[in-house]
Image: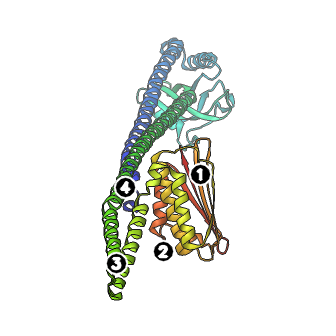
Amino acid sequence: MFSNLPYKIKIALLTLIPLILAISAIAIATVQQTKKLATTQATAFENQLIIAKKEELKNYMGLAYSAIKSAYENPLIAEKYAKQEAYNTLKSMDLGKDGYFFVYDYNGVNIVHPRKPHLEGKNLINFKDDNGKYLIQELIKKAKNGGGYTRYLWDKPSGGKSVEKLSYSIGLDKWKWMIGTGIYIDDIQKGVVAMKAKAKKSTTNTLLLTSMIAIAATLIIALIGFIINLSEGRLATQKMRDLTHKTVNFQEDERKRVSRELHDGINQLLVSVRYKLDNAKIKLNKQSPNDDVKDVINAADDILSTGIQEVRRISRDLRPTLLDDLGLAAALDSLISDFSERTNIEVTIKNNCKNQRLSQEIETAFYRIVQEALTNIEKHAKKTKHVILKLEQVRKRVTLSISNDGIGFNKSTLDQTNPDRGLGLRNMIDRAELLEGHMTVNSSLEKGTTVIVNIPL
């Protein structure tokens, strides 16, 4: 398929495809790197916030322990009253609308819960969050091991729904208590999601910008290629036109030279021979020769007369001297007169350019086109009785039309791929196009044919 494409399209594709592939690869790499960077940044952001939250929880637990230290470490206070004092202190400590301290014994029985007092006294050792984690067991385990952090899902007091929470718990081994507090980190997740969304939007914008650059670059290259092709095409066309123009001018000059040689050389020799034959006939008539000699001389004279007329006709067809000396109008009058005399076809001429001379190239082209058209009418346009030839100048354009009332033909024969298309018609079209004009042929069966040629001045 690629091998069947025109050469210019192949060059364009070989130029554009690598560019598009390169820009696409850059765009894909940019998107991948942007996604990777966004993920790394989001993870780093989340880790930094978690570290900050953990430090905050440690500080809260330090405050809580400091608040109950006097009761817990004082041996003079009975354990019962010390626990009650610690209970009252922890329950009254408030860390905002969502922050509080909770206490469980090592068996999982809730002792303090400021936000959900109905849980106090209940054993929640087997309580699981929405993810199935035994969070009370985890909190107690970390507390027994010297303190630690636990992540789980818990109902947010201000939100009413289960969200992710980070807690820090320590143990009071003397009382077998686990004291803990927590911070809801759903806002961290929202920040991470927002950052990823922003990164995704940035990635989309980057991809869009890259696509726009790719499209713009492709269009610019395509436009430059089109301009170059157009310029090169025009230059090639102009060079071809100049070459054809030189070829036609050379042909016309050569025809003119051959015509002059026939007229001034061979024709003069033939006329001289005929003159001498005439003198011979006169002398023979005076001497009364026999009739056989006279017949031979008369036959030779007839053949010579025919030869002279044929040389004159060939000379005129090659390059009529009237075209160079008197112009197109006189040359057409002579051409049509000979045509009518030879074919008995009436020709009407309507010419409004008689009073001016056109350029030599245009006059030659019109003469040759009319000459070829009349030849085609004589050979192919059977039943033709009348031909109308019009030559007129409108503004800066000269129009020639030749119409006949012959049998006409099917216009499909004008197709360039048709083997029946004649070389004469191609020559007529080439002569018109050589002068930046154009030729159209209108014909239909039994309705005649019209040839129209337009050439700009």
Instruction: Give residue 399's mark.
Output: 1
The quadrant of the rendering that contains the N terminus is bottom left
Residue identified by numbered label 4: 256
Looking at the image, which is closer to me, 19 or 81?
19
Q: Residue at x 48, y 33 (%)?
A: 206
Horizontal relation, residue 389 to residue 196: left or right: right
Rendered residue at 54%/19% (across/down): 79
Residue 58 visible in the displayed image: yes
Q: Nearer the viewer, mark 4 or mark 1?
A: 4
Q: Position of residue 37 (x, y in %)?
A: 41, 32
Q: How far is mark 2 from mark 1, CA to CA?
A: 28 Å
Mark before the other along the chain sequence, 1 or 3? 3
Front disc: 3 or 4: 3
The residue type indicated by label 3 comes to Lys
Circle 2 residue? 420
Q: Nearer the viewer, mark 2 or mark 3?
A: 3
Q: Element under label 1?
A: strand
Q: Earlier in the sequence, mark 2 or mark 1?
A: 1
Query: According to the image, label 3 marks what residue?
Result: 286
Is 373 displayed left or right of 292 in the figure?
A: right
Residue 426: x %, y % from top left: 47, 63
**Tag 2: amino acid:** Asp
